[in-house]
């Protein structure tokens, strides 16, 4: 895969500078992702644990939607919302967690910009 | 000769962003610009960021080039769609001249602010030798007021909503919190600029309605209005489109207050409850998320052959507060969808005459549409690219939009897409 971790972390760091972006990471199947947990602002560790423990199953499920045009997946998790922007035909995803009351539409525009940058970096 | 350029900077440092966006714009022009419109998202607010943004911009801009602008929630440009950054448009050439003007205290006395702003702008607008007079004006939008004991909230469950509204109407207006009073400003401003087409925008932040700023040359202001009056030997074609559909849910409002922006009764009943009932919203639906829902159900008043969509922004007791003044008491609920919003962009672009070449597209689009479309806003850019074919354009996302054409009434809206295209 092209694109250094440093470049990708730079894009994720830009997202994490937004007040309402609590987590931004690039996940691959097996949770071998690119992220810097020291910059995460998520207080609720249960969500992070759930993400770690279900990531393989998540990719297994979304792979079944290959060819259907699946592009984004949203989980409403009480006070938080997790957005999965799929990259590279279902085996990589940009994951962002925001507060449920955040301005999701505006943030989504920048998450989409981040996805496009990462897609260019990894040469999909 | 008439040239235009649009630039974007994504740098987080305000001074560098200012320099960067100035360099990008100036590098695309072969002559010194006659005017610049500069916009930025609220991200630069901290630590005097907007002053530094302007300082950075002016460090690259030749002296005495007029500049106005303000904060917006985002922008669509040929470089992409963004909800963070600094965005500028500039025009140069011997066919154009421009003059900036400013008015102050728009929430306290919008008519006086409009008079001052228009007096400054008329010097160019009234010059008879140019073919077209066009004015871009941006004005401070409303902010959610900090209510004693409640803080800043969109839903205030209280028994005496009318008292809170009176507080807002008096103390709030004096302190310049609460509704923006843009319609009062715009009506007066357009009366004083009768021969100029006016594209009007309400400055905004990142959809939190906490603060917004206006830029005027080297200065940063709050609760102000800044305008750029332009005279040009070319055509500016300006149209507003909506993409809204009537639902046939109609009602009559009364107990209007807060400068005409709120109502306490719907068909003689408690307005908050009755609106929820008419929209089929279950109990509990009315929470701090509400603005995500009200975007899709604008309250529309109609007159002079135009529709005027209002977004419900606050619920104070049984009073519903919208973003601008109601001119009629007969209301119909309209609805919007993602595809109808994109349809409004296509409809607007089709109205641009095809026998002339676009030099610059300058658009204002409601932030409600941006929040509703999310990343799908890139489809707006795709449509703009198809029409502008490499020519620059800048669509900024605002809290409200307005349009005045000579001989027609001034119209202020929410949920609209208004595009002015400079054509040669």
Image: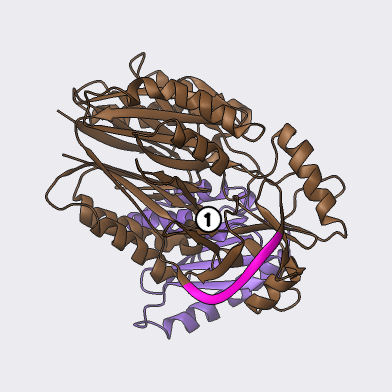
Q: Residues in magenta?
A: B246-254
Q: Quadrant of the N terminus of chain B?
A: top left
Q: Secondary structure at mark 1?
A: helix
Image: A5 above or below A94: above
Q: Nearer the viewer, residue B155 or B56?
A: B155
Instruction: Give the x, y percent position of residue A32.
Output: 50, 66
The hue used for chain B is brown
Asked whether the viewer can see residue B221, the reply is no
Instruction: Give the x, y percent position of residue B206.
Output: 56, 47
Drawn side of residue B355 relative to residue B92, left or right = left
Residue that appears at 75% across and 69% down: B268
Residue occupied by mark 1: A107
Asked whether the viewer can see residue B350, the reply is yes
The colour scheme applied to this rendered structure is by chain
Q: Which chain has been coloured purple in this picture?
A: A
Image: B363 above or below B274: above
Asked if the magenta segment contains residue B56, the reply would be no
Image: B92 above or below B141: above
Instruction: Give the x, y percent position of residue B101.
Output: 45, 23
């Amino acid at each position: 895969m092209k694109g250094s971790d440093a470049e990708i972390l730079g894009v994720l760091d830009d997202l994490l500078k937004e007040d309402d972006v609590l987590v931004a990471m690039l996940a691959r199947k097996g949770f071998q992702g690119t992220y810097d947990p020291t910059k995460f602002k998520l207080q609720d560790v249960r969500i992070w644990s759930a993400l770690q423990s279900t990531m393989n199953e998540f990719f297994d499920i979304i792979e079944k939607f290959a060819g259907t045009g699946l592009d984004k997946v949203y989980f409403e998790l009480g006070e938080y919302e997790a957005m999965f922007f799929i990259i590279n035909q279902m085996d990589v995803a940009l994951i962002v967690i925001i507060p449920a009351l955040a301005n999701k539409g505006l943030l989504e525009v920048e998450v989409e910009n981040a996805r496009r940058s990462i897609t260019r970096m990894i040469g999909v | 000769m008439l040239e235009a350029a649009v630039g974007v900077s994504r740098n987080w440092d305000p001074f560098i962003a200012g320099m960067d966006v100035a360099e990008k714009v100036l590098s695309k022009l072969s002559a010194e610009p006659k005017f610049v419109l500069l916009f930025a998202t609220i991200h630069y607010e901290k630590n005097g960021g907007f002053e530094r943004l302007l300082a950075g911009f002016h460090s690259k801009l030749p002296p005495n080039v007029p500049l106005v602008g303000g904060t917006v929630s985002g922008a669509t440009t040929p470089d992409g769609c963004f909800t963070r950054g600094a965005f500028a448009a500039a025009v140069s050439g011997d066919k154009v001249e421009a003059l900036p003007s400013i008015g102050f205290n728009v929430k306290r006395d919008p008519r006086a602010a409009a008079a001052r702003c228009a007096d400054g702008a008329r010097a160019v607008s009234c010059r008879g030798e140019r073919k077209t007079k066009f004015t871009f004006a941006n004005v401070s939008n409303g902010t959610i007021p900090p209510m004693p004991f409640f803080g800043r909230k969109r839903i205030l469950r209280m028994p005496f909503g009318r008292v809170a509204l009176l507080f807002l109407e008096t103390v709030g207006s004096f302190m310049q919190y609460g509704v923006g009073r843009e319609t009062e400003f715009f009506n007066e401003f357009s009366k004083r600029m009768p021969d100029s087409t006016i594209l009007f925008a309400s400055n905004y932040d990142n959809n939190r309605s906490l603060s917004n700023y206006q830029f005027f040359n080297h200065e940063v202001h709050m609760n102000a209005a800044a305008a750029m009056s332009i005279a040009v030997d070319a055509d500016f074609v300006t149209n507003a489109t909506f993409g809204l559909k009537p639902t046939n849910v109609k009602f009559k409002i009364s107990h209007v207050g807060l400068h005409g922006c709120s109502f306490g009764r719907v068909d003689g009943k408690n307005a908050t409850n009755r609106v929820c009932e008419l929209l089929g919203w279950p109990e509990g639906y009315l929470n701090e998320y509400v603005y995500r829902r009200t975007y899709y159900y604008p309250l529309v008043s109609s007159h002079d052959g135009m529709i005027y969509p209002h977004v419900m922004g606050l619920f104070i007791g049984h009073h519903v507060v919208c973003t601008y003044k109601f001119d009629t008491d007969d209301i119909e609920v309209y609805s919007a969808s993602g595809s109808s919003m994109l349809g409004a962009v296509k409809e607007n672009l089709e109205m641009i005459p095809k026998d002339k070449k676009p030099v610059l597209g300058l658009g204002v689009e409601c932030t409600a549409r941006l929040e509703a479309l999310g990343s799908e806003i890139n489809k707006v850019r795709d449509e703009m690219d198809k029409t502008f074919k490499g020519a620059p354009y800048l669509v900024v996302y605002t809290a409200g939009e307005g349009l005045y054409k000579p001989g027609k009434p001034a119209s202020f809206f929410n949920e609209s897409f208004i595009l002015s295209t400079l054509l040669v």
